[in-house]
Amino acid sequence: MGSFITNIFLLASVHGFLLAALLFFKKKNRNANRVLSFAIFILALDLLFVYSTITEFYKTFPSTFGINFAFPFIYGPIFYLYTKIVTGNETHFRAKHLLHFIPFVLAHLYVSPFYLLSAQGKLAQIEIYLNEIQYDLVFIGFLKAVHGIIYTSFSLGLIHRFDKNLRESLSNIDKIKLNWLRFLITGTLIVWIVVALTILIPVFVDPSLNIYDSIIYFFISIFIYAVGYGALNQPEVFNYHDEKIKLADAKEETESTGTAKYIKSSLTEVDIERIKTELIDIVEGKKLYLKSDLTLSQLAEELKASNHNLSEVINTSFNKNFYDFINFYRVEEFKQRIKKPEYDNYSLLAVAFDSGFSSKTSFNSIFKKYTNTTPSEYKRQMKLQFVLDAENRHG
């Protein structure tokens, strides 16, 4: 392995130790970040052992070889637990979570006889391991990849549900959605799949193509830097628990339409129509959608209704979640404002902010969702239509 890659491993390891310390003492998202701090520490330690193996440090201290053998069994569970805490499904690490690390313990026990050998015996065994395929270890390596795929899939499921629940309660999720973590875990899932394939290549294709370590540890290096950026910049998400972001747990989706179906609803048809009418009157009358951080709780308080009942009415009567319901009004407000002469000198983004949006990214994506065009293209078409109408009137 080239010295360039080797040095990357060493630098990423040092960076990982520093990042682990920063995360451990970071006050925001403390419980989640301490779990993540442990994960980054293990990753950094793993890279350090790989570096020591590449530089043949084991020839001086044979007992250091393979200490990180079972470390990959830690990564899936620890990032899954981190995701659970970040998304509010757990508050902190509990003793029961240690059960997730049974595969790690079993893998270490399996290779423990190596550490009972003499120094010369260890060195002889290391040479065999480095030069011959050990099918039992290959099988365990494949299990590591499968184990990682399973846990990253679980983590993606948690993030998907979290995002869905946010949209049931908040009209602005730009600052707390976990896109960075979703992309990171999706990337990790892809890496685990690639790792599974690279483990099998030496067995079924060519024994000389043993590229497992190179791939997984190169991506671990990238992973450390990516996690550092994302976690250190992640806003506090637990403030939003009072907004009932777990509200979606009280309902299930129909398979045919995807519309939320509420179980054991206490609302009658009369109640639904009453809340629906009052909802439209108050949202349109007071233009509550202009408040960029409007929440379901605030709207429910205005209506003197419960969060659950209001969410049910929005889902069943408008076939939208709260997020889409409010942002639909913001799009319509924007469309009306750009028709007025007093907004001719305003930028599109300024008008969007006046209409209740809080960021350019969300504005563009939501506007395109409802109009199938961009804001600038919509304005251009609107002006063109205005000219054509004027010509028709005078023609």
Image (cartoon, rainbow, N blue to C red):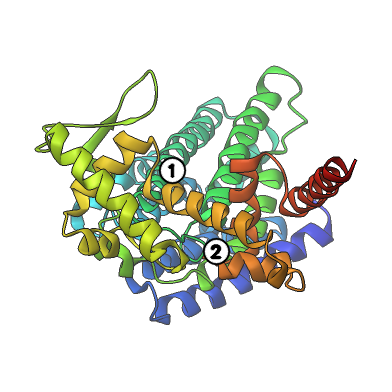
Give how far across and how far down residue 235 sits, in percent.
46, 71
Question: Within 10 angstroms of label 2, few (less than 14), some, or many (20 or more) residues?
Answer: many
Residue 143's place in the image compared with 322, above or below, is: above
Residue type at tag 1: His
| Drawn side of residue 30 relative to residue 187, left or right | left
Q: Quadrant of residue 54?
A: bottom right
Task: Name the secondary structure under disc 1.
Answer: helix
Q: Which label sits on residue 160?
A: 1
Query: Which residue is drawn at the image coordinates 28% and 65% (left, top)?
Result: 298
* Residue position for label 2: 357
| Drawn side of residue 86 relative to residue 346, left or right | left
| Drawn side of residue 392 relative to residue 256, left or right | right
Give how far across and how far down residue 82 sits, in percent.
39, 57
CB contact under 8 Å: marks 2 and 1: no
Task: Name the secondary structure under disc 2.
Answer: loop
Residue 334, can we see it? yes
Residue 50, can we see it? no
Give how far across and how far down residue 269 sits, in percent.
16, 32
Picture mark count: 2
Find the distance from the CA under tag 2 to the CA under tag 1: 23 Å
Q: Quadrant of residue 249?
A: top left
Q: Which label sits on residue 54?
A: none
Q: Nearer the viewer, residue 354 or 105?
A: 354
| Drawn side of residue 25 relative to residue 344, left or right | left
Q: Quadrant of residue 186?
A: top right
Query: Which residue is drawn at the image coordinates 29% and 61% (left, top)?
Result: 299
